[in-house]
Each structure stands twice: as structure tokens, then as C-alpha cells.
Image (cartoon, rainbow, N blue to C red):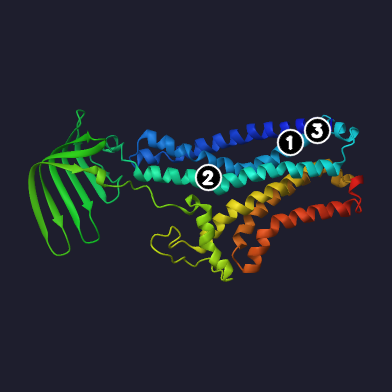
Amino acid sequence: MNKLIFRKFSLDIVSFFLIASFSITFIVWVIQAVNLLDLVSDDGHSLKIYFYYVSLNLPKIFSKTIIFVFFISIFYVINKYNNTNELIVFWNNGIQKIKFINFIFRFSIFFLILQLILNLFVVPKTQNLGRIFIKESNIDFLPKLISEKKFINVVKNLTIFVEEYKKDGTLNKIYINEKIDVHKSKIIVSEKGRIIKKNNKYILRLFNGGITNINKNNTFTLNFSETDYDLSDFSTKTVTRSKVQELDSIILYNCIKEFFLKKKLNKNEIIQAPSNSTCHLRTVQSISEELYKRFILPFYTIVISLIGASLIIEPKSKYFFKFHKLNIFLSGIGTLILSQLSLKFFLNSINIAYFIFLLPLILIFIYYLLLLIFTKFRLNFL
């Protein structure tokens, strides 16, 4: 009988969690997708690339909502059971409150594992896939971005100006400025031109113009009657270097391990590594913060689940009973804020780093210690 009761309780929490988390994730995803429209409007990517890229952000958004939504789910379901007197079913079947709390503790471990899998493996992989896809994609939307009498610089080291863009696709009076390196550049001026697609790549076919090559020492000009200018040689202006949150967790761990082994924590220090290392020229602070978010933050899932379970403990004081639900809710929100604030002090010293690393476990220990004190070391009478 007890198994059936706990099974129904678990299903209610999971049902509310799925509805709430998917709703919040979708809302945040839509807002983020709108903010990323510049991939099309400014950077010249196609809609296919845009939707693929923003879809890969879904695991990241979902992982960030888990801990908050899980706390709200526990708080809501227990409060609902309390208002409808369904909690009496637990007590009438001999289920002690400490067993109820311990069940919440064990139940939260499932969400802890889910969040660890997402943070350590799924999210970095999907974020990296999105970056690789952007990096290897062509500027498929370029023809639609070219406007009359506007400087277009959607690709790196290239600026295009068109005096007239006719409906039939003909370009009149074209100016192109290509920056080759610090000391070299190329200027192309053409009377007419047309953008054509050849082998899935865009080529700008130019007619009646000249090419001026400029370097540090001299300048020379070459006239042409017709030439093809390959736009596929240029990369998008979108940042294509991997961010810290896109790197594999094992790589990040290996990057930061030596700093902890040496007990040398300078958060502004830049990691010097071989040129083929993905951690090269990244700060210790950025890597440490990312590892903290991936590995330590999920453990607060257990802490806030125990706080939510405290709704079943009725305070003896009438004053505290009046504000019991509000105090529990604020305690949960306060713990989530603490988990974020502790990140700011993570690298102040090696001792503080170890303390913050163990803080979720310390809070769990303090919680059960307070239960012992509250019941005068008789948890069965909770």
C-alpha cells in the first residue's frame, strides 16, 4: 500500500515538473530564438542553419530550469496534498514524516543524475555541434542582404557596396574592399555584376572593372572585362572559436587540475598551453566557473528538495505556523541564490574553494542535524 501511495506522489511531482519545465523552456527558447535572428539578418546564414542552431540550445535551457522547477514542483504538490488533506493518507498508513523526507531525498537523486548528465555531457556536446555547424556553413542568405547604397559587411574582412540592385538580380556600380592581412588589402570596382550559385557556393560575377592591390610597399591595378569573385573563401562574422561552455568536461578538468594540485589559485591567470590545446589563453576563472556550474550546482537539487519537504513539519509556534509556507518558499529561493553567489568566491583561496565544493553536502548535514535537534534526537516522533 505504501508503495502505491509514494508512486502516486512521485507521478504527481513528475507530471507537474514536465509541464512546468517544458513550458518555461519553450518560452525562454522562443525569446532566445528571436534574439538570435541576427544570424540571418546580420550574418547572412540561411533559415535552415538558424533553426538548426537555435534548436541545439534547448538542452542548455532545460538544464538551467531543472533545479528551480523541481523545487516548485515539490512545493506545489505537497501544498496541494496538504490543502486537500491527502497527506493524512500517509500518516494513517503508518508512514512517518522522517520516512517521507527520506523518500524525497532519494527521489531527488534521480533529478540530480539527470542534471549531471545534461551538464557534463549533453549540453557541451550540443553547444559545440551548433558552433561547428555555424563555422562550416556558407553565407547562404547573402543575396537577400545586399541592399542599394548600403555597406554590407556580413562576412569577415569583406565590405560590399552596391549603387543599384535591380529586380532581375543585376548589380550596378559595385565596390568591394577585401582586407587580406594587416598590411595588404584589395579594392575591386565594377560597372556591373551578378550573384550566381555554383556547386552550392555563391560567386559574384563582375563585368568591366578594375582590381587594385594595396600593400605596405606599393600599389598596382589590373583591369578586367569579366571575372568571378568567390565568396565561399570568406567566413561568417559570427564568433566561431569554441566558448568555455562548449568544451568537453574532461578537457576542462585537465586544464584546471594542475592549479589545484599546486594550490595556486589566481583567477585572472591565463592558461598557457600548446597551440593545439583548447584551453590555451583561457582564464582560470572562466574554466573554474564552468566546472562549478556543471558539477557542483546540480547537488543543490537535493538541498532544495529537502527544504520543500519541510512543508510537512508543522512549527509549534502559532506565529511561525502562520508564515510557515512563506518561510519554506523563501528558504528555497535563498538557497538557490546562495548557490549562485558562492560562485563569486570560488577562487578567493584554496580553502574557500574546497568549502564551496562541499557546501551542498554540508547543508544536507545541517538539515538533518536540525531535524535531530527539533525532535530531541527522536526522529520517529517527527
Q: Position of residue 151 (x, y in %)?
A: 26, 45
**Residue, x 35% and y 35% (percent of image)?**
46
Q: Tell us which disc is closer to us: 3 or 1.
A: 3
**Residue, x 14% and y 55% (percent of image)?**
213
Q: Nearer the viewer, residue 134 or 144?
A: 134
Residue 161 relative to residue 313: left or right: left
Amino acid beneath label 2: Val
- N-terminal label among 1 and 2: 1
Query: Is the residue marked by circle 1 packed among few (<14), some (14-19), or many (20+) residues within 10 Å?
Result: some
Q: Quadrant of the C terminus?
A: top right
- Which residue is tagged 3? 3
- Which residue is tagged 2? 123
Amino acid beneath label 1: Tyr
Circle 1 SS class: helix
Circle 3 SS class: helix
- N-terminal label among 3 and 1: 3
- Which residue is tagged 1? 76
- N-terminal label among 3 and 2: 3
Amino acid beneath label 3: Lys
